[in-house]
Amino acid sequence: MNKNVIAIDGHASTGKSTLAKRLAKRLGCLYMDTGYMFRVLAYLGLKGRYITQDSLDGTALMKEVGGLHFSWTETPKGLAMAFDGKVYGDEIRTEEVSSKVSQVAALKSIRDFLLQQQRALAQDHKVIMDGRDIGTVVFPEAQFKFFMTADAEIRAERRHQELLTKGMKSDFQTVLNNVIARDQQDASRSIAPLRKAEDAIEINTGHLTVEEVEQLMLQHLQ
Ligand code: DC
């Protein structure tokens, strides 16, 4: 059993990252957003034109990023994950990146590459990891595992509001279609699909406040 890892898996926009960040602060752990890692690679793929509207050249993308790595780096907000020394921000949260990232996350070469880095980054730290396959593949021996769900409409509305608050362009229907498509792709891929680990605690966050979900999680952790 690995007592240093708390795994938080589940569907997109169920509040995983908000909860993981709050718990990390409260419990003095590092917060590891594994979706960030996939997003950075999708962003670089789009930038390098290895990913276009209708094609994805995983071999070329791996050639570009395969020699680089993620590392913890000090920032004014605390330790953050940098890739090749750079910490990424809102540029990896656009709908363009969101619409392509599941395809990148379905590639075996990319998953193998990130799996090894996720395990390495968690070594010698207490971490709260948020993702899709943490409790099933990355750290199946984690002591605590949560699996978050909520209706697609509720999740899309959250994401839509989040984008608008950040001053980014957003259309509800596009966001909803994206959320549904992403769920399907994440759950149906052959490698490390999104699914609840048998021993994970499932929480439906749809009609709960952040504080209520946090309390529920703390009760389990205690
Ligand atoms: O959590 P997020 O929306 O930022 O994740 C971005 C994408 O990466 C999402 O489509 C699922 C994928 N992902 C994954 O396959 N495995 C993980 N551990 C984390 C994210």
Image (cartoon, rainbow, N blue to C red):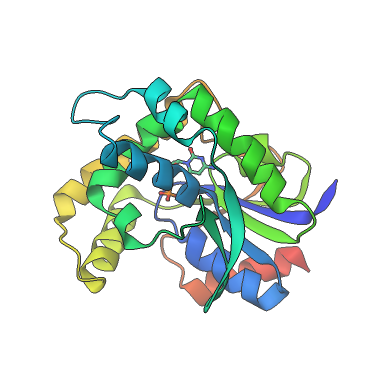
Q: Position of residue 112 (x, y in %)?
A: 59, 29
**Residue 49: horizontal and vertical position, in percent?**
25, 33
Q: Is residue 85 above or below residue 26?
A: above
How many discs appear?
A: 0
Q: Tell me residue 53's x, y (percent).
A: 18, 30
Q: Where is residue 71 shown, x and y percent of the image?
A: 61, 54
Quarter occupied by the N terminus: top right
Residue 170 visible in the snapshot:
yes
Is residue 136 among what the camera can see?
Answer: no
Q: Residue at the location (31% across, 63% down)? A: 158
Q: Give the camera-side residue of 127 and 75.
A: 75
Which is nearer the eye, 97 or 22?
A: 97
Q: Is residue 144 rendered to the left or right of residue 48?
A: right
Name the residue at 66% across, 34% down.
137
Residue, x 51% and y 47% (percent of image)?
A: 10
Classify the position of the C terminus by image quarter.
bottom right
- The relative height of residue 104 versus residue 86 in the rendered view (above or below) is above
* Relative horizontal placement of residue 134, taking residue 50 as reference (left or right): right
Name the residue located 21 percent from the left edge and 30 percent from the top edge: 52
Q: Is residue 119 left or right of residue 62?
A: right
Q: Is residue 143 left or right of residue 114?
A: right
Where residue 217 sits, quadrant-wise, is: bottom right
